[in-house]
Image (cartoon, coloured by chain):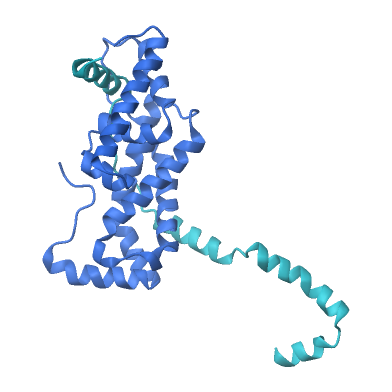
Chain colours: A blue, B cyan
Amino acid sequence: MKPLFPTASKEDEGDEMDLLERFAQGELEAFETVFRQFQGEVFGWIVRIVRDPGIAEDLTIETFWRIYRARARFDPSRGFGPWARRIATNAALDHLKTARPEVSLTEDQAQVPPIDPAIQSDIREQIEQAFLHLPAKLQVVARLALIEQQSYEEIAQAMGISVGGVKSRVFRAVRQMRRKLKRLGIEP
Amino acid sequence: MNDRDDEKLQELLRNAVGPIADTELKQDLWPRMLGKLDEQTMRASWLDWVLIALLPLWFFFFPEVIPVLLYHL
C-alpha cells in the first residue's frame, strides 16, 4: 500500500529541513510550499474519516489553519506528515462530535462502491445507523481500521494513542455495534 | 461471541458502508487558505474592540491627554 504521507528521500532531506524550519519561523512562502505539498494527503486522510469531499475540503483548510497557528511549536526534525495527520484527525474528530448523528452515509456523498445485493436495504440501514451512533472516538477508529483498512500503527500515530489502544477501541466499537443490532433483532 | 462472529460483523459493516472510492483532492485549496489567513489577520480581537470603546471615555475624563497623543502621532 502506498503510504499516505511519504517521507523525503535522503538527497532532499536538507532542502526539506530548511523548508520546514522556514515554515516554523513563520515564512508565508514556506507555508505555501508545505501546504501545496501536503494538501492532497491531508484531504485523503480526512475524507476517509468524514466521507464527504466538501466537508473534507473545509476540514483540510481548518487543519492547515491549526498547523499555521501552532507552527512555533513544530519540531522540523520529527517530520511534517505525522504531525499534520494528528492535527487532521483531531479536526475530523471535532467535526464528528458536533455533526453526529445527522451525517448520513448516503451513496452520493460517500461515493461507496456497489453494495453486496445480498444485504437487504433495511439491514444495511440499521447497520449504518448503529455505526453512526457509536461514540466519535470509536467511530473514527472503526472507520479507519475496519472500513478503510488502514494499519493499526498508522491509526495509533494519527490518534496519539498506542496500538493496544486502537485494538481496544476496535473491540469496543464492534461490541457496541453488536449490542445495538441485537436490540434491533439483527444477530450477525 | 467469538472471532468468527466479529469477522462476520466486520464484513457486514464493510458491505453496508464500504470504503470511500475516491480520496483524490480535485482542486488546489491554497486560494481558500490564503483567504482564511487574510480574514483572520484582519479580524480584531474582542480586547481591541474594548480598548477602542474606552478611548472616547478616556478623552472625556482626561481631555489634557489629547494634545499629548496628537503630538506622538
Image quadrant where residue A173 sits: top left
Q: Is residue A169 above or below residue B53?
A: above
- Residue in front for this viewpoint, A3 or A115: A3
What residue is rendered at 32% in x and 9% in y?
A: A187
Query: Which residue lies most toward the left here?
Result: A10
Q: Residue at x 45, y 62 (%)?
A: A69
Asked whether residue A51 appears in the rendered view, the answer is no
x, y percent for residue A111? 33, 30
- Of all residues, the one furthest to the top in this rendering is A185
Quarter of the image that includes the N terminus of chain A: top left
The residue most toward the bottom is B71
**Looking at the image, is B31 positioned above or below residue A58?**
below
| Point 29% across, 38% down: residue | A165
Instruction: Name which quarter of the figure residue A34 lies in.
Output: bottom left
Judge from the rendering whether residue A64 lies leftward or rightward of residue B44; answer left or right.
left
Q: Return the x and y of residue A100 as percentages of the image width and height.
A: 48, 31
Number of marks in the image?
0
User: Is residue B60 at least partly visible in the picture?
Assistant: yes
**Residue at the image position 34 percent from the left and 59 percent from the top:** A35
